[in-house]
């Protein structure tokens, strides 16, 4: 059941919150910073350990970047495409991620990793857990931009019931604590045209990886 807490955030599960429109006033500088990162570390379709090409195009910024290839999932200090360190995490990304976490009671969030996902129409992300990090006491903070998406948020086991949440441009999700390892995924993106981002959805997730 969805309900609002005292700050008007929407509680989607234990220690998991939807901050509707949290980023709306900051769209322009955020998207500028995003395009800068992508120029330095291009979006690419990574390969899963099972040998599948992901439909979502990804890149990273921050000290550590999440990567996958035939050998598995891991955090890496270098971009395997350019062999350079990942671009520095833009200050505005970091500040807003920390502010979002704080606004729902996670007061010690210091992200060292930021994964950028680009969804074109028809891209999806299958149900998974974020569990490649060392310390699960930190939450995951996720920013959404561009085309809307249906996001499924489940429980600690894959087969547990899920709730579907509409994520729109400017929304933030924060999940941690008792929900930190909950399964989640993004359904296939429907055709559309966003005024700023065209036929794409971007998601930026912040993590403490180490
Ligand atoms: C993720 O689970 O890494 C991305 C979630 C999203 O795109 O909303
Ligand atoms: Fe995830």
Image (cartoon, grey):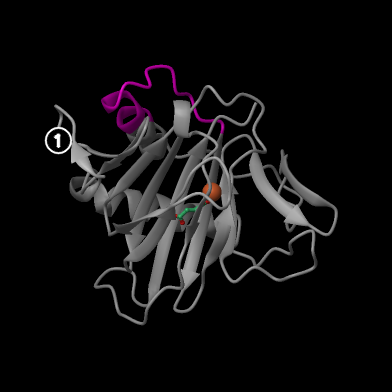
Q: Is residue 124 left or right of residue 173?
A: right
Which residue corresponds to the image point at 40% horizontal and 39% vertical from the top-left? 93
Q: Is residue 124 left or right of residue 91?
A: right
Which of the two residues, 163 or 135, is positioned nearer the viewer here?
Answer: 163
- Residue positioned most to the bottom: 191
What secondary structure is marked by label 1? loop
Which of the two residues, 154 or 202, is positioned nearer the viewer here?
Answer: 154
The stretch of residues the image draws in magenta is 98-112
Which residue corresponds to the image point at 54% horizontal and 40% vertical from the top-left? 156
Residue 47 image position (x, y, % from top left) = 74, 64
Q: Does the magenta stretch mainly form a helix, a strand or a loop?
A: loop
Image height of 26 relative to 38, above or below = above
- From the image, tell me which residue sits under label 1: 8
Where, quadrant-wise, is the C terminus in this rendering? top right
Image quadrant in which you'd find residue 191: bottom left
Where, quadrant-wise, is the N terminus in this rendering? top left
């Amino acid at each position: 059941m969805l309900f609002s807490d005292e700050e008007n955030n929407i509680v989607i599960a234990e220690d998991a919150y939807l901050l509707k429109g949290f980023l709306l006033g900051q769209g322009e500088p955020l998207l500028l910073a995003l395009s800068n990162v992508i120029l330095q570390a291009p979006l690419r379709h990574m390969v899963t350990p099972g040998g599948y090409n992901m439909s979502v195009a990804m890149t990273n910024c921050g000290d550590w970047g999440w990567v996958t290839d035939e050998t598995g999932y891991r955090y890496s200090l270098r971009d395997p495409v350019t062999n350079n360190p990942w671009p520095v995490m833009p200050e505005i990304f970091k500040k807003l991620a920390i502010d979002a976490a704080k606004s729902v009671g996670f007061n010690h969030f210091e992200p060292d990793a930021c994964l950028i996902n680009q969804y074109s129409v028809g891209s999806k992300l299958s149900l998974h857990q974020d569990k490649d990090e060392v310390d699960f006491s930190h939450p995951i903070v996720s920013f959404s931009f561009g085309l809307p998406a249906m996001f499924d948020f489940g429980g600690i086991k894959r087969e547990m019931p899920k709730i579907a949440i509409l994520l729109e441009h400017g929304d933030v999700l924060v999940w941690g604590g008792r929900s930190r390892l909950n399964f989640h995924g993004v359904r296939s993106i429907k055709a559309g045209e966003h005024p700023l981002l065209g036929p794409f959805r971007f998601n930026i997730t912040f993590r403490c990886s180490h």
